[in-house]
Amino acid sequence: MTLFDQQIELGSTSGASLNLLHMRPRGNPRAIVQINHGVAEHAARYQTFAHYLGQLGFATFVHDHRGHGATTAPDAPIGRFAKSAPGMGWAKPVEDVKCVNDYACKQYPGLPLIVFGHSMGGLIAMNFALTHPVRLSALAIWNTNFTSRFVSRLARSVLASERMMLGSDVPSRILPAMTFQTWGKSLKNAQTPFDWLSHNDASVRAYINDPLCGWDASVALWQDIFAMASRGRGRAELGRLPSNLPVHLVGGGQDPSTEGGKAVIRYAKQLRSIGLRDVTGRIYEGFRHETLHETASPGSRGAMEDFAAWATSAIKRSGATVANIGQQISATG
């Protein structure tokens, strides 16, 4: 049971059957917001955000990625994106995002489209933008770590060894210890291993009790995650983005997954260094990882209000791009 107006089974060109949730805008539609969720969770957890945006006139779409939630695909059981070469499975969830993009734009033709991603969803959102740079009017990446080259090389080396010894379909034994478990242990007086997600006890408990959340990702999925992070910080790839694309970055000052927001600040500097002129963002000092579930001041509501203000401004600034986006999509596919 969710607050969404519509649940759709959308066939993707990747072969997946996507579980897609849609919140219709109240009043005159202003823009489309396409949400991408994080690892080991699912689309329905974004219902409060979608409801808030719908009240302001934003048409909102969020789907379960491959290997997550109620989405199904022959090559993507829970915990992996696809059967493919190491680190190449990420192309299929990006293809799925394009299919949702197509569907959303057909439902609301001519509206600007904002692609939003949280955590792993931020990696997917950026990789979608790099693959299809003319298909979005603005990009929001929240609570995402694109990792340093050193960390990426270390993790990918570990995963390659695990793949050779264990296979690709089994849960990684080492990466959870390097990530989720380390982040959980970083908090003093934590009541659960997942308190690092937010200060919101009810949300953390709901996550723990949700069978579609908190599972251990496969070796293959971890390889795809680090491949997306690597691609998302490559200067040549980032050079594909329009220099006037509005990009909004958000982090939490108490989020261990982004080094207390430091990784977000580094990424903002990198984006500006390659010529992006409209990079904005904020580090919420009291927040942990899940900005949209936080109770620390100013709370998730304050963060949603900030997003809506940025989105409204970004739409105005990208007006010339929005006017031509339909023609560009038709021309490029």
Image (cartoon, rainbow, N blue to C red):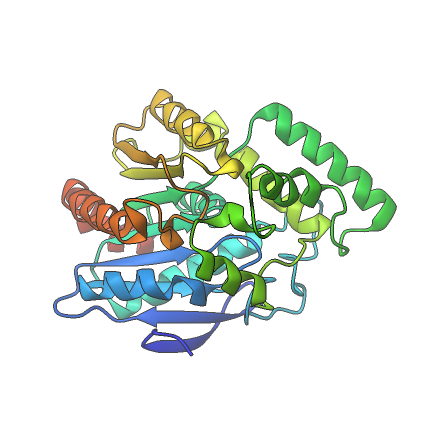
Displayed quadrant of residue 285: top left
| In-image side of 319 versus 83 (left or right) | left
Displayed quadrant of residue 161: top right
One can see residue 120 in this view: no
Where is residue 182 shown, x and y percent of the image? Answer: 64, 39
| In-image side of 196 versus 327 (left or right) | right
Displayed quadrant of residue 4: bottom left
| Residue shown at the point (62%, 45%) measured from the top left | 180
Where is residue 22 shown, x and y percent of the image? Answer: 34, 70
One can see residue 307 in this view: yes
Q: In the rendered picture of this protein, how many numbered marks are placed on residues?
A: 0
| In-image side of 222 versus 311 (left or right) | right
| Residue shown at the point (19%, 66%) measured from the top left | 55
Q: In the figure, 95 relative to 63: above or below?
A: above
Residue at the far top: name it.
273
Where is residue 273 shown, x and y percent of the image? Answer: 37, 20
Where is residue 167 shown, x and y percent of the image? Answer: 82, 51
Residue at the far right: name it.
165
Q: Quadrant of the N terminus?
A: bottom left
Q: In the figure, 306 relative to 83: above or below?
A: above
Q: Quadrant of the C terminus?
A: bottom left
